[in-house]
Image: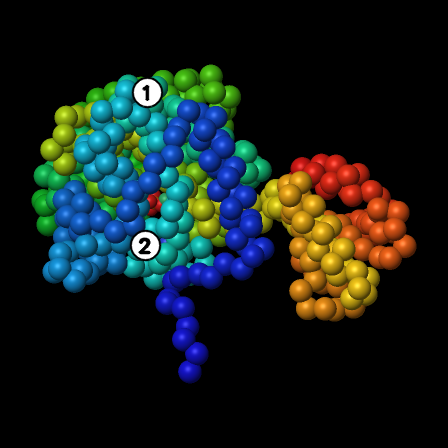
Amino acid sequence: MPIERPRGTNDYGPEEMARRRAVEGILQDAAHRFGFREVSTPTIEHLDLFTTKSGPGIVKELYAFKDKGGRDVALRPEFTASIVRFYLSELRNLPKPIKVYSVGNVFRYEEPQKGRYREFTQFNAEIIGAPALQGDAEVVALAIECLRSVGVRDIHVRVGHIGMLRAFLKLPPEDQGKVIHWLDKRDFTALKAELTRLGLERMAAPLRQYIELKGGPEVLDQGAKLLAGVGTEGFEYLRALATRLKLYGVEHLTFDLGVVRGLDYYTGMVFEVDSPNLGAEKQVMGGGAYTLAEVFGGEPVPQTGFAFGLDRIVLAAAAEGVQLPVPRLDCYVIPIGEPLRTKALETLQTLRRAGVSADIDLLGRGPSKNLDYANAIHARFAVLVGEAESKKRRVAVKDLDSGKQEELELEALITRALQRPKA
Ligand code: AMP
């Protein structure tokens, strides 16, 4: 029986991989334009890193196991905890603010469906040590710029504030975590049961109304009324954030007090971006402000971050018909007859050394089969090395997009091949 790949994982063929790398490159460029630098952390971490804040309940969502030395380890389900660990051990020595990004695979033991996998790729960015408003605005602006740069236009940016909810709930962390979890899942039956257990049943109705508030600045006033007694600080903060984001050219924000985010560590502004074209798994990005360093024994320091699901951006780009800048083979060299194979190999070398991507027939096929192959791999030019042209130190070049053929000197071919069309 053939061996299948594990459930919830993916194989990516050359076309798909080229699209993924193109998106990854665009996101990296955007991060560099915003002054973020790349860091890398291990795929495997001590289990404690994830249970310290989220409690043992998180283990069922992880790929966690004992290594051969009997240590409890887990495959990372996200980047933030690793970045904070790295910050506390080394990055804290760098001048602040620290602006870093990472890209790599993460693992979660989830029920797989379209756009929801057990192994997937995240693009994660964090700012550590910037004042909240400045850091939050920069992070939200980068997230939006990432999508704009990829060419995904149809997006909904929703911003909320989990700090206000936490202040309203005034519960010990574990109970608070449970209530927030059910709010995040929109499971109102479980929410009511939990609140009843805590003797807070009266909170069920206002909480439900609260998380359904979504729209313009008016929802901030409505939210403040519903959470009467906790003040308006968070709501004023969101207004200030929206004003600051206008300076970044971000005009279309929705205030969504229902952005709750399942993870326990968010403490302030939280935000999500949806691509409505994706159906059920439409959330391409999530993030917010948190204070994790303290949890791991460090000094309090403001932190804000986000993570994109790379798979979902690629799907969102496809749904909008975005043409990604996928590299193509420039030249496919075809010897016209066996005696010209040596000449064709020389041509190939010249092209490759000049920085042109070039390939050659390895199977000894005839010219017409070779042309079919060159078309099938989406090469830009077929370079036909024939007797007559060779004598004139020329090659016959067929533009495989237009079908036009002409004779060129190699230098001219190189110049043309290096002028790659922008996608
Ligand atoms: P989170 O760390 O849960 O906030 O997720 C950040 C982003 O990662 C989400 O907005 C999704 O785009 C993506 N994501 C989360 N879970 C999955 C999954 N199981 N499969 C694919 N992408 C995911």
Q: Is residue 312 above or below residue 244?
A: below
Q: Which residue is mark 1?
A: 133
Residue 223 picture location, percent across and down: 30, 29
**In which image quadrant can residue 415 be found?**
top right
Left or right of 212 on screen, residue 378: right
**Mark 1 secondary-structure assignment:** helix
State which quarter of the image contains the N terminus.
bottom left
Q: Position of residue 332 (x, y in %)?
A: 72, 54
Q: Secondary structure at mark 2?
A: strand
Report the quarter where the C terminus lies: top right
Image quadrant where residue 35 sits:
top left
Q: Is residue 355 above or below residue 66?
A: above
At x 28%, y 27%, the residue is 128
Q: CA distance from mark 1 to mark 2?
A: 31 Å
- The amino acid sitting under disc 2 is Phe
In this rendered view, identify the residue nearer to me: 129 or 341: 341
**Label number found at residue 371:** none
Q: Which residue is mark 2?
A: 107
